[in-house]
Amino acid sequence: MPSIPSCPALASAYWYPFAIDLIRETIARLACCHTASGVLDALQHALGSLFPPAHVGICLLQDDACFDLLCSHPATAQPQLSRLTDALIESGHFARALRNIPGRAVFLPDAGGLLQALATPRQIYGMVLIVHSPLADEHMGALGVLLDLAAMQLERFDPETKTCSEPHDLVPQSMGSPTTRDRLTGLTDRIQFIHFLHAATATSKSDKPVAVLILHLDALHRINQEFGHELGDQLLRDIALRIETVAHSHFLHETLGISEFDICIARIGSNEFGIVLSQIARSHKLTDTIAYLQNHLSEGFRENHSNLYPSISIGAALCTDERTPVLELLRNADTALKHAAEGGRNQFAVYRSAWEDSASLHVQAESMLHEALRKNHFKLHYQPLIKLGEHRLIGAEALLRMPGTDGPLSHPGYFIPLAERTGQIVEISEWVLRMICRQLRRWTAIIPSPFHVSYNLSAIDLHRLDLVPQLRRILLEEKIPPRLIHIEITETTVARDEQRAIDNIRALKHAGFEVWLDDFGTGFASLKLIKQFPLSGIKLDREFIKDLTQSDTEDAIAESVLEITRKMRLPVIAEGIETEAQHRFLLRHGCDFGQGYYLGRPVSPDKFDAQLARVKAKRDPGSV
C-alpha cells in the first residue's frame, strides 16, 4: 500500500481513494481470517499502512482482566511499547479509553499518538496504541472503521477456540443469490462464480459487456513439493487477498466504470482463480486493468521469511452479446490463458477470434501425432558426422520427420514443440531411441569401427526422475551399449530446472552416455552451462558458421569460441558447414568435428547404408 504524499494539497486529493482502498484491503484480509491472531495480524498490517512512521502496539484483554501486548510494529519497538503500555495502565489512560467506547480515542500529546479501544458495544477485546506519528482528522475516520471491522470479526469467534465457526460475508457479491465460499481462501466458489456469470451475461449489452478473467498459478505443485502444503495454502490465501484488493480498488472501478456489485472473485480450481467484471462502461481499458493486476501479483509474496515470486498467467475474454453461451466464454478465456502461458512468466492475453484457426490446426496436429505413433508413420533421417582432420565418417545425427503431411504440420519446428506441450514427446522419444538402436545394430555389422548416433532430448525428458533407468532399460532390451548413444541438450531444455538437469546429466554420464550441448551460442547462458555442467562437448550453432570468411567479426567470434573450448578441453562439432571455405577455416582453427550440407545431407536409413558400404569397400575402412 503506498504512503500518503507529504504535500497537504496532494494529501487531500489522494486521501479518499487511499483510505477506501485500505479499508477494502482490510475487509478482504479479515474475510480470510479464521483465528484471533489472524485478525490482529490483518489489523496491524492496516495500521502500519495508515500510519507509516508510527510505532503501533495491539494489546489483547485477557481472562484475568489484564492487557497483554501481543503485536508490535515494527518488531524492534516491542520493548518501548511494552514499557509505555505499563505506564499508561498505571496512569489511568487505559481506563479513560475504555470509558470512551464506542469509537473515541484518548490522545497522548507527550508520546505523539493516541490510545483507542478495540471493542464492539457488547464486548471489549483490547486496546490499540499508536505513537510517534502525526495525526490528522482524515486518519481518525479510517482508524475508527478499521478498529470496528476487526472488532466485529473477533465477535464472530467462539470464545473457547478463538476461531471462526461460520462462513463470513464481509465483501458483498452481486446478483442477489446466497454465496458459497471456498474454505481455504474465503472467496466465492466455482458454483457461485458460474451462477454470477450466467446472470451477468444474460443482462450484458454491446456498450456494457462482461469480461471473464482466469488466473493460473503456474508452479503450485513445485512450491508444495519444495516448501510444503502449508506454505502453498498460505500463498493461495495471499494471492486471493491481493486479487481482491485490486479488484475492489478505486483505480479499477474508475478505469472500467463499474461498481462494487459488478464484480465476482472466486477460486475455481486448485491453482486457479476467476474474476467476472460486468457492466463495463469502458471496455477499451480492460488491458490496462489486467496489466495493473498483473503488476501487483508479480511484486512477490513474503512467506515464512522467504520472498516468493510465483508466475501467474492471466487469460481474459470479453462478452458483448447476451446470446454468447457461458461455456464458450469460459473456453475463450481458457484459450487466452494458454496463449499467455506460452509467452513466458507473468503474462496475460485477451482472447481474439483469429486464434480459432490456430487452435483448429493444433487439434489437427495432435491427432496426426497420435496417428503417426500408432501407425508408425514417423521416419528418421541421418546426417553424417565427420572428423574434420581425417575427413572420416564417425557417426550421425538422427533427425525426426513426419512424411505424408503438407504445410506447417510436417515441419519438426512445429510438431515437436506441440508434442512437448501435449506430453506426446515422451512416447515419441522412446520410439526414436528404439529405432536408433535397431539401426546401430545393422550399421555395426557393416562397419565395425566405433560409430555413434546422436539425438536431441526434450526438456520434459531431461527433467524426468526416471530418465536414466528408462534409457538403460531400452538399451538393454535392444542390446546396444550406452557409449554408442550421444544425447544432445539445449540451453532451453536445461532452463526449466537447472539442478534436476545437472543431476540427470551426471547420471547419464555415469551410465556411459555422452552428453553434448547443442546450439551453443544462441542463448545468454551458454558459457555458464559449459562451466557448470558435466558435458562431453559442444555443438557450435550454424549462426556462427554461415558467415564465416565473409565477416571479420564472425571469424573473430568463431576463433574465440574454439580457443575457449580448446583450453577447456571440450571437443567441438561445427553445425551447418555449407562451403569449402568454411570447412578450411574450421580445420585451420582446430575444430574437431563437423556436419552440414557440404559434408553430407540428411538421408534415409537405406541411403546411409549405402554410404557405409562404400566406406567398408575402401582399402582403409576408416576413411571416406
Image (cartoon, rainbow, N blue to C red):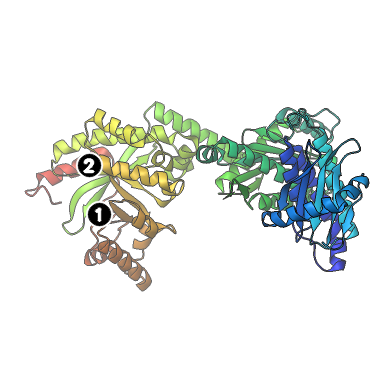
| Residue name at image x 78 percent, y 52 percent | 85
Percent of width and height locating residue 323: 78, 32
Report the amino acid beneath label 1: Leu
Front position among marks 1 and 2: 2
- Tell me the tag on residue 551: none
Label 2: how many Cα within 10 Å (few below 14, some 14–19, many 20+) = some
Label drawn at residue 599: 1
Residue 90 seen in the current view: yes
SS for tag 1?
A: loop
Residue lying furthest bottom? 552
- Nearest the viewer among 135 and 60 is 60
| Of pointers 1 and 2, the one earlier in the residue sequence | 2
Circle 2: element type: helix
Cβ–Cβ under 8 Å for marks 1 and 2: no
Q: Quadrant of residue 569?
A: bottom left
| Residue 532 drawn above or below residue 464 | below
Image location of residue 517, percent across then percent down: 34, 52
Q: Is residue 547 left or right of residue 292?
A: left
Residue identified by numbered label 2: 483
